[in-house]
Image (cartoon, rainbow, N blue to C red):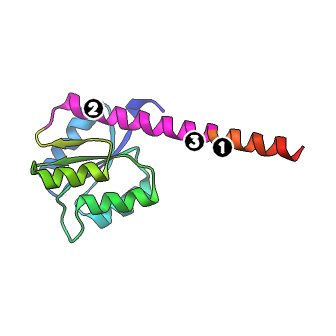
């Protein structure tokens, strides 16, 4: 997978902000596969479209916030989530750090920062999958040797 082919889901409750982020991502060469404004739709879109990366606002419409949606998505998939938020209070940022290891950006953020975070999250995901496949291969080889 080339980084330019990276598929991004935007989860943002403010349509103007979401539209701006979409335009910025597309200008950087990323493919935006959707915009949703609440946690339930984020979970459904993640499971249906399996994006390479999710940009997740912490404050969303509805009862579920971005932290809760991320926990649910992480239970079901290995999709990296990068938080984007206007909140800079310590408890919110601490909660986000405990939920996601792929980055937290406070609005406004630069295109360079965002691009680097998306690329890093994508590379991390690809490398993790590769290492897991190598481990499975070694386990299978060891199992076959024991059978002989």
Decide: marks 3, 1 in contact (CB < 8 A)?
A: yes
Residue 131: percent from the left, percent from the top? 56, 37
Q: Which residue occupies the foreground of this view, 103 or 52?
A: 103
Q: Which of marks 1 and 2 is nearer the N terminus?
A: 2
SS for dot 3:
helix
- Using the image as rendered, state which of residue 23 and residue 123 is in the foreground: 123
- Label 3 crowd bin: few (<14), some (14–19), many (20+), radius 10 Å: few
Residue of label 1: 136
Which residue has dot 3 on it? 132
The residue lying at 78 percent from left, 46 percent from top is: 143
Q: State the CA–CA distance, disc 1 to disc 2.
A: 32 Å
User: What stretch of residues is rendered in magenta?
Assistant: 109-134
Residue 122, image x and y in percent? 40, 37
Residue denoted by label 2: 115
Please identify the residue farthest to the bottom as the structure is shown. Answer: 63
User: In which quarter of the view is residue 116 placed?
Assistant: top left
In this rendering, the answer to whether 33 lies above or below 113 is: below
Cα distance between the residues tagged 3 and 2: 26 Å
Location of residue 96 with respect to 25 vertically, above or below: below
- Residue 107 marker: none
- Looking at the rendered structure, the secondary structure element under dot 1 is helix
- Residue at the right extreme, as displayed: 148
| Mark 2, secondary structure of its residue | helix
Q: Which residue is drawn at 45% across and 29% down?
A: 2
Dividing the picture into quarters, in which one does residue 12 lie?
bottom left
Quarter of the picture holding the C terminus: top right
Image spot of residue 76 (x, y percent):
45, 60
Q: How crowded is mark 1: few (under 14 residues within 10 Å), some or many (20 or more)?
A: few
99 versus 28 height, above or below: below
């Amino acid at each position: 997978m080339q980084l330019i082919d990276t598929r991004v889901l935007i989860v943002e409750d403010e349509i103007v902000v979401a539209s701006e982020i979409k335009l910025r991502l597309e200008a950087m060469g990323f493919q935006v596969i959707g915009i949703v404004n609440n946690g339930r739709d984020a979970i459904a879109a993640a499971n249906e479209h399996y994006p390479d990366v999710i940009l997740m606002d912490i404050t969303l419409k509805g009862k579920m916030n971005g932290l809760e949606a991320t926990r649910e998505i992480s239970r079901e998939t290995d999709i990296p989530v990068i938080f984007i938020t206007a909140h800079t209070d310590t408890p919110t940022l601490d909660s986000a750090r405990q939920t996601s290891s792929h980055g937290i950006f406070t609005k406004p953020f630069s295109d360079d920062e965002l691009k680097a975070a998306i690329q890093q999250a994508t590379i991390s995901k690809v490398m993790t999958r590769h290492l897991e496949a190598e481990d499975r291969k070694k386990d299978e080889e060891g199992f076959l040797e024991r059978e002989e």
